[in-house]
Image (cartoon, rainbow, N blue to C red):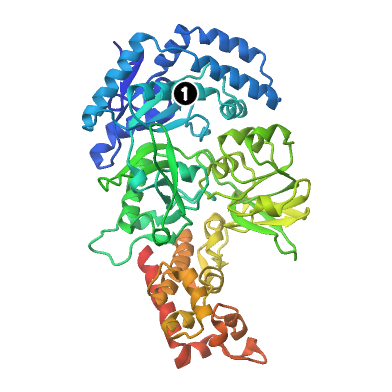
Amino acid sequence: MKKSEKHILWYREISKNDVALVGGKNASLGEMFSQLTKKGINIPDGFVLTSNAYWYFLKENKIDKKLKEIFTKFNPESIKSLQETGKMARQLILKGVFPEDLKKEILKDYKKLSGKYNQKNVDVAVRSSATAEDMATASFAGQMETYLNIFGEENLLKAIKKCIASLFTNRAISYREEKGFNHLKIALSVGVQKMVRSDLASSGVIFTLDTETGFPNVVLINSIFGIGEMLVKGKITPDEFYVFKPTLCRYAPQGKSYKPIISKNLGRKNKKYIYAKAGELREVLIPKNQQMKFSLTDNEVLTLSKWACQIEEHYQMPQDIEWAKDGKTGQLFIVQSRPETVFTPKTKTFYEEYKLKTNKKPILKGIAIGGKIGQGKVHIIKNASKISEFKKGEVLVTKMTDPDWVPIIRLASAVITDEGSKVCHAAIVSRELGIPCIVGTLKGTKVLKTDNEVTADCSQGLQGRIFAGKIPFKVKRYNLKKIPKLKTKVMLNIGAPDIAFKTSFLPNDGVGLAREEFIIAEKIRIHPLALYHYKKLKDKKLKKKIEGITQSYKDKKQYFVDKLAEGVAFIAAAFYPKEVIVRLSDFKTNEYKNLIGGEMFEGEEANPMLGFRGACRYLDKEFQPAFEMECRAIKKARGILD
């Protein structure tokens, strides 16, 4: 039988050219398994039910004709019609019966896969893969279902049928309408892949660019303990690593003192998913001492980054990758890769700048997604059963969205959630739709009130701000092609690492002044001498406060060095290989006093502007330890990028 006629294919038989047969997700897995495992990238094995199997299942159960009837009555403008259409379509499929020959073939290949991994009934992930999925302009993120921890023949058949039915979830129907796909011409392929025991270790996602700006010279890794579903649902904040691509290829573990990791941020990982009974996961709490540890080692971060770069090079486009670590073997695996859909099709010919000026203090803060500003009346929606009440132009406020919320996310002027991270589902969909989104506010649903007007500001880098009322703002758009070339070098002044990647797209000749003050005040927050003399501090409240910020560091001096080095390296990476001139901190005494522990080491001055600052401070013997720590940080930053 020809490959194009088969109902089941193994990954080794599939290439990236088989999207029409197995969908984007499975085509990518097959391509990587057949082409990249020989280069050292680990991919769990599996097999795939093709689009032929999908059409065969529908035809034998006469579902294809009934679906046509259902969709002739569908009104895409009505949420009620969407809900009714989706429910009827899914029920048709779930009541269907597998043709006997297809059933036998599925179970035969499941037995083969079990034999390969020396298990009677191997644990698998059952993944959906639509034939229009994972194109460069559409991610289909979370639109169809994946079922994890499936083992046993009966459970496998049920999971496959539920995967097929998920082609008609409300969110999938809505998404196809948004992207202009024909509901009855798309087929669903189902992948059956060996599960990686990440419930005993860690998992996460990788992007081969910066998700907020499209800056291409970094790999972004998010990592959590346990199975990755917890991250997608936005229930916790992951560990975050940025790795610098230009020096990654030159990094040798044995021969280099600094690793090309330009940023490491410890997440809030207080819970995780582990195996429960077949087809189910169980949420458990993570012990406090483990929460304070990174879920990946530096070397594992670099291994994943190198694999990500190899995958990106293979596909010749930025990638959105899922990975998992097996707690039994300690091995890392790539379990999925798709094109990154927000920045892939775009060329940077315009630079857009949103500006909001106000003396008001924000009523809430969170993680900003995108760089826009949105405003409107708050509408708090606590669960998906109430989404039909949402009106176009309102600000959606909820604990956390999941894929069922897509129909109203596209109607929102902004999205605000209590939970989540830069790679949770709400963030991915909002980013793709170009809607300002602020996740991880912790208490948005408690502070904000339905019908109150708010402004959601994502224009200030990584921190999203929410203000009461509608605050006027301006949007400036610059055509980068029309900016004249000058004989004089134009270098930038910059102090905030958060905006470095975005700013790098402006025409420039490097950075003429990179200030340390913002990094110390906003990222480190503690007076350098309070960290240097930490063990000698007698103020118990002060020590407790410092410990709360630096608890992953036994050596508090190293905390200052690492965080300052990361901030400087972040700015330098944005403009590499152009020159970046860094100025050591030039705080005045009153500004240093505002840092945690600052009152212990700073005096009173009548005019701090003309007093103990700059060169005067660095010549002072008592401040010498802080000066030396700054110098160590600059040296480390250079080492990361050189």
Rendered location of residue 52, percent (x, y):
40, 14
Using the image, determine if residue 500 lies above or below residue 195: below
Q: Is residue 19 visible?
A: no
What amino acid does circle 1 point to?
A: Lys
**Which residue is situated farthest in the front direction here?**
277
Rendered location of residue 303, percent (x, y):
31, 51
Q: Quadrant of the N terminus?
A: top left
Query: Quadrant of residue 254 in the image?
Result: bottom left
- Horizontal placement of 617 versus 44: left or right? right
Identify which residue is drawn at 56% across, 38% down: 402
Q: Quadrant of the C terminus?
A: bottom left
Instruction: Return the residue at label 1.
Output: 162
Q: How many marks?
A: 1
Identify which residue is drawn at 74% across, 50% down: 449
Rendered location of residue 264, percent (x, y):
43, 60
Secondary structure beneath dot 1 equals helix
Using the image, determine if residue 525 lies above or below residue 259: below
Using the image, determine if residue 153 lies above or below residue 491: above
- Horizontal placement of 521 versus 2: left or right? right
Identify which residue is drawn at 44% across, 81% down: 534
Identify which residue is drawn at 38% across, 27% down: 191
Q: Is residue 417 visible?
A: yes
Quick one: 152 or 529, which is closer to the camera? 152
Quick one: 430 or 235, which is closer to the camera? 235
